[in-house]
Image (cartoon, rainbow, N blue to C red):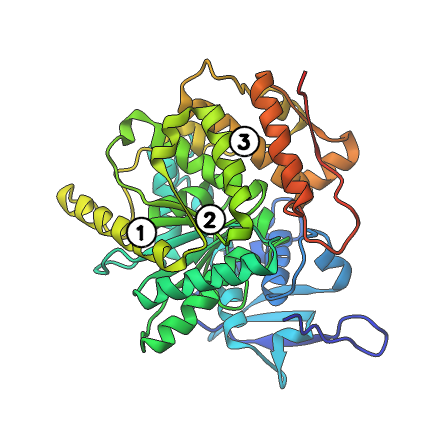
Amino acid sequence: MNDTQIDKSGKPATVSARISPAGGLDILSRNEVIRLRDASGSGLHGLLRRCALAVLTSGEIGDDPRGMFEQYPNFDIQVLQQDRGIKIELSHAPAKAFVDGQLIRGINELLVAVVRDIVYVATQLEQGAFDLHDTVGITHSVFEILRNARILKPQIDPNLVVCWGGHSISRDEYEYTKSVGYQLGLRGMDICTGCGPGAMKGPMKGATIAHAKQRRRKNRYIGVTEPGIIAAESPNPIVNQLVIMPDIEKRLEAFVRMGHGIVVFPGGVGTAEEILYLLGILLHPDNAGIPFPLIFTGPKQSAAYFEQIDAFLRLALGDEIAQHYKIIVDDPIAVAHAAVRGIDKVRNHRLDNKDAFFFNWSLSIPLAFQQPFMPTHAAMRALAIHRNRPRHELAADLRRAFSGIVAGNVKDEGVRAIEQHGPFEIDGEPEIMRALDRLLQAFVQQHRMKLPGGSAYVPCYRVLTN
């Protein structure tokens, strides 16, 4: 429900306030506070302002990365150092984030998460704590960011289901995601998603009802995002643990290291990117025999969507790729049963290999899946999409192709690049290019690229099929 308050001028109403952080924000040093106030290129204020506004507009439906600041152009946030701790000063903040002059508790906690993660990552990078040129060092950075955010919980049996899917889905698809979340919640599963609307909100909403029925407390609804995405996909109101990873690659690694199983709902290019990321990792020879339940599911109206995804994956990566996932159509109970059985196998494997329940250390993630991909026009054109390569390497470049389209659709820097230089060009083996073009056209026709209601979608890419 969008409950944006409008003032007499027809613009969204705003509030200015000084608040005390909720949720246990650690004390900040004077240097950290200065960095958060610094509006220069080397400072963190711009990043803080962007992520904070996304949290304060939690629950609003939209995927325009610049739309928030068009609605709230005068918004600002400052972190103030005081003798008894810190205060957060909000200027011209969305009034919908307040009730009777008080910032909503959940939004306050998410705002604290924003400050916490931005400061921690910047400080650790400056100190050289992370070796970001080495696969072990990158995994270490993911672990440390999650640990600092208090996301990792020891002494809990595996029960975290990661749910992937699109922000732009039909009502039937959304209701289905709630039904699946409900069945997972009845069976004691916690939910982790990309934190936005659509298929990221539905499973959490369904699980909250199931958890309440089971009188289950200390439930986890984890949202994992990154700065380029959060501006276009504000956290949904159910998220009670938020973590902002530095980039999309570390966000994806966080999903597969934390999660004990993954359920994929219908989505667009972002969902395809996630699928190819995980499948590329599972195809790596070092990961043979590691159980990782992966379920594709949707209502019967969406059966064609997964047929298209399955056909594309088989064409590009070979028919044997299908052994890594299961497709279940229109049966939430069967999805929950499959997830629970798969997670039982994960538990037994972790016990046998003395691996932690809360972080999948044994999974080998090649550097090609960890290094941040900057989707410039040159980088997109240079992708080597040919079947004469090892399959996990091909999956890595296919993932980058979809990642570039996500950037061109919803990330501010990607949108600007398209405005300046025209659409990205994607080239490769003709048969794969024709299949990719058909898949992307289907996404456009099914309104999976952008939320419906605005102007007609203009592709940010051009697939070279000749």
Q: Which mark is residue 121?
A: 2
Q: Secondary structure at mark 1?
A: helix
- Cα–Cα span, label 3 and label 1: 30 Å
Q: Is residue 44 above or below residue 104?
A: above
Residue 425 location (% of width, % of height): 68, 25
Q: Amino acid at mark 1?
A: Ala
Q: Amino acid at mark 3?
A: Arg
- The residue pinned by badge 3 equals 400
- Cα–Cα span, label 3 and label 2: 24 Å
Q: Earlier in the sequence, mark 1 or mark 2?
A: 2
Q: Earlier in the sequence, mark 3 or mark 1?
A: 1
Answer whether labels 3 and 1 touch (C-beta < 8 Å): no
Q: Secondary structure at mark 3?
A: helix
- The residue pinned by badge 1 equals 338
Residue 86 location (% of width, % of height): 51, 70
Q: Is residue 184 above or below residue 267?
A: below
